[in-house]
Image (tube, rainbow, N blue to C red):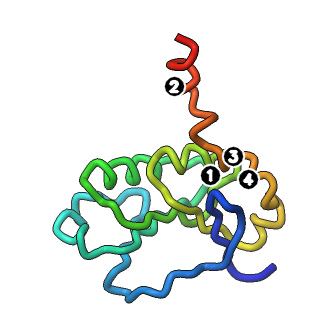
Amino acid sequence: MSGTVIVTDRGFGPDDWTGAAAEVAELAPGDDPRALAGRLDALRLVRIAFPGFADGRGFTLARQLRAMGYAGRMRAVGHVLADQYAMARRAGFDEVEIDAALAARQPENQWLARADWRAHDYQSRLRASA
C-alpha cells in the first residue's frame, strides 16, 4: 500500500478528487474558519489537518464550517485514528485521508466497525431508551 488512503463509510479507497485547486481550502488546527465565509459557496472540498490524534481542534473547525452553512465535501487529513472515525463523521466530515502506514496499522475492518456512526451515538441511544 502506498500513498494515501481515503476512508469513507464504505471502507478504504483511492483519492477521487478531480476538482480545481481554486475549489479547495486547506485549514490548519489554529485557523479561523470565518476567513472562508465569503468563499463557502465556491468551495467543493475543505481539507482540515490533524497533525496528531490528540489534537481535536479539527473537529471544532468542521462543526463551525457546517454551522456557517458549508455543504460541500469535508475531509479530515492526517493522524486520525479508527476510534475517532464516528466522531469525525458526527462533526461533519465526509471522509478521512490517512497515509498508507496508518492504514496498515489500522486496517479497513477497524474503520468499518465504526462506519455505522449514527448507531453508536450515545445521544441517540439515550433518546431511544427514554
Q: CA distance from mark 2 to mark 1?
A: 23 Å
Examine the image and state in which quarter residue 129 appears. top right
Q: Is residue 78 left or right of residue 68?
A: right
Q: Identify the residue shown where x is 52% and y is 10%.
A: 130
Q: Earlier in the sequence, mark 2 or mark 4?
A: 4
Pointer 1: what residue? Answer: 53
Residue 32 point in image, percent of width and height = 29, 58
- Tally the numbered discs: 4
Examine the image and state in which quarter residue 27 appears. bottom left
Q: Is residue 103 above or below residue 24?
A: above
Q: Is residue 11 above or below residue 26?
A: above
Nearest to the observer: residue 86 or residue 2: 86
Q: Nearer the viewer, mark 1 or mark 3?
A: 3
Examine the image and state in which quarter residue 73 appears. bottom left
Pointer 3: what residue? Answer: 114
Mark 4, other Cα within 10 Å: few <14 / some 14–19 / many ≥20: some
Q: Which mark is residue 112?
A: 4
Nearest to the observer: residue 50 or residue 64: 64
Q: Amino acid at mark 2?
A: Gln
Q: Identify the residue shown where x is 33% and y is 61%.
A: 71
Pointer 2: what residue? Answer: 123
Q: Identify the residue shown where x is 71% and y is 62%.
A: 11
Q: Amino acid at mark 4?
A: Leu
Mark 1, other Cα within 10 Å: few <14 / some 14–19 / many ≥20: few
Considering the numbered disc 2 on the image, is that residue within a helix, a strand or a loop?
Answer: helix
Q: CA distance from mark 3 to mark 2?
A: 16 Å
